[in-house]
Amino acid sequence: MRTNRGGEGAPVLRRRSLTREDVLTAAEVGELLRLPKSTVYELARRGVLPSARLGRTLRFVRADIERCVRGSRG
């Protein structure tokens, strides 16, 4: 693992690039969670599901959705 400037500070973590399988549409999240697409949009609007707006569309990162679902089990 590399560190910032001369070995001091926080480690620099390398992120791998997202693939098509990593980024989901609302419909795909609905299939994954067995929810209607409209509910996925509503949960994203309320901030319950993490999402990113790309132009006029919402996209979801699979790992973020899985982490959110795991965190909600209690």
Image (cartoon, rainbow, N blue to C red):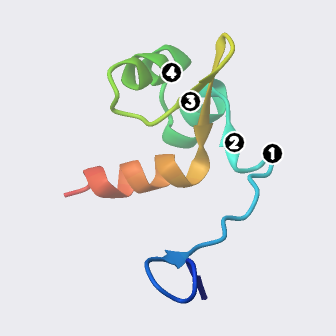
Residue carrying label 3: 52
- In this picture, residue 66 sits left or right of residue 57: left
Q: Element under label 4?
A: loop
Q: Which residue lies furthest to the top in this view?
A: 56
Q: Do the residues labelled 2 and 4 touch (CB within 8 Å)?
A: no
Q: Which of marks 3 and 4 is nearer the N terminus?
A: 4
Residue carrying label 2: 23
- In this picture, residue 11 sits left or right of residue 17: left
Q: Are marks 3 and 2 in contact (CB under 8 Å)?
A: no
Q: Earlier in the sequence, mark 3 or mark 2?
A: 2
Q: What residue type is labelled 2?
A: Val
Residue carrying label 1: 20
Picture coordinates of residue 33, whole percent (x, y): 49, 40
Q: What residue type is labelled 4?
A: Pro
* Mark 3 surroundings within 10 Å by alpha-carbon count, few (fewer than 14), some (14 through 19), many (20 or more): few
Disc 1 from disc 3: Cα separation: 15 Å
Residue at the (55%, 19%) spot, across then down: 37
Picture coordinates of residue 60, whole percent (x, y): 59, 36
Residue carrying label 4: 36
* Mark 2 surroundings within 10 Å by alpha-carbon count, few (fewer than 14), some (14 through 19), many (20 or more): some
Among the 4 quarters of the image, the one containing residue 13: bottom right
Q: Are marks 2 and 1 in contact (CB under 8 Å)?
A: yes
Residue at the (61%, 88%) spot, across then down: 1
Q: Which residue lies furthest to the front in this view?
A: 6
Q: Element under label 3?
A: strand
